[in-house]
Amino acid sequence: METLYQSLVCVHITGGFGGLLLLWVPLLTRKGGRTHRRVGWAYVTCMSVAVATAFVMVAILLVDPLAAKPLRRPHPPEEIAVIMKQYRAFAAFLGMLALLTFVSGWTGLTVLRHKKDPLGMRTPFNLGSSALLGLVGVVVLVMGLQQGIWLLVFLGPLGILTGFAGTYALLYPPRLNMGWWYDHLGGMMGTGIAAYTAFTVFGAQRWMPDLARTALFPLFWIVPIVGGVIASEWMTRHYKRKFGDLPGGRPSAEDSGRVSTPSA
């Protein structure tokens, strides 16, 4: 089990790191162009690998954490209990990010198939996955409050907001000129937020362990979450103005044409 778990970790890191590098190409290139589509699908592939391996890792840690990460020396029972709690807290963090990445990415992709029919997104799977994300966010928040793990306290509301807001949007889709585009942009930005949060948290612990023990450590996971949410909101409002979905915006055929070609 330990060998399997470590292999999953290696594949997970490889996929996630590839996604971190590729994310910026679709964001910065012409929307709907060949580069946007091709690199975008490469990004989706990398993140799919990261999410799939994360789910398996979480399952292993929840079922038998000491088999995946065995202790190298004897520990008293009270220490083992603390270690088990830490392993499961890590599983909650990883699972929350994996589910957030999956739901955001799935929404960002499938909305491309329903550009003219937003109600087509209202499937049992989409509703269930969004609601599940919200419920898992509640569990993670409660777990963080009970154990004093501020990372989970901060991450839980993100899952709650994303999950339940997504469920509401599926039930009552807004009537916007380019609603599918905003959902696509927000979904893919959501995957990037999750990826960079994981990278900064794990990277800080691995490469700067001393700094990770200081009061500055929360910045490693607060910055990508807050920064990513602000950037996503700013970009969405920018395109809403451009496409006439905000007061003062002026839609143009040229602007709409630039983002009308992507397909799933």
Image (cartoon, rainbow, N blue to C red):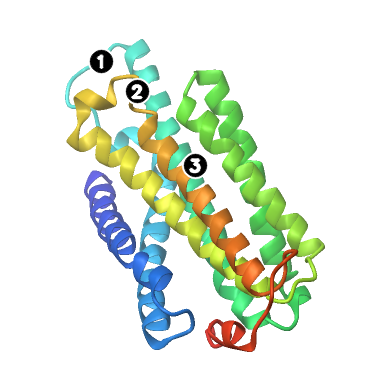
Residue type for callout 3: Val
Q: Which of the numbered marks, if any, corresponds to residue 226? A: 3
How many angstroms separate mark 3 from mark 2 (CA)?
30 Å
How many angstroms separate mark 1 from mark 2 (CA)?
10 Å
Res. 18 image quadrant: bottom left
- In the picture of the structure, the residue carrying the numbered disc 1 is 75
Q: Are marks 1 and 2 in contact (CB under 8 Å)?
A: yes
Residue 55 in view, yes or no = no
Q: Residue at x 40, y 37 (%)?
A: 221
Q: Which of the numbered marks, if any, corresponds to residue 205? A: none
Q: Is residue 80 left or right of residue 72?
A: right
Q: Residue at x 56, y 34 (%)?
A: 140
Residue type for callout 2: Ile
Q: Residues within 10 Å of mark 2 (few under 14, many from 20)?
A: some
Q: Which of the numbered marks, if any, corresponds to residue 83? A: 2
Between circles 3 and 2, the one closer to the viewer is: 3
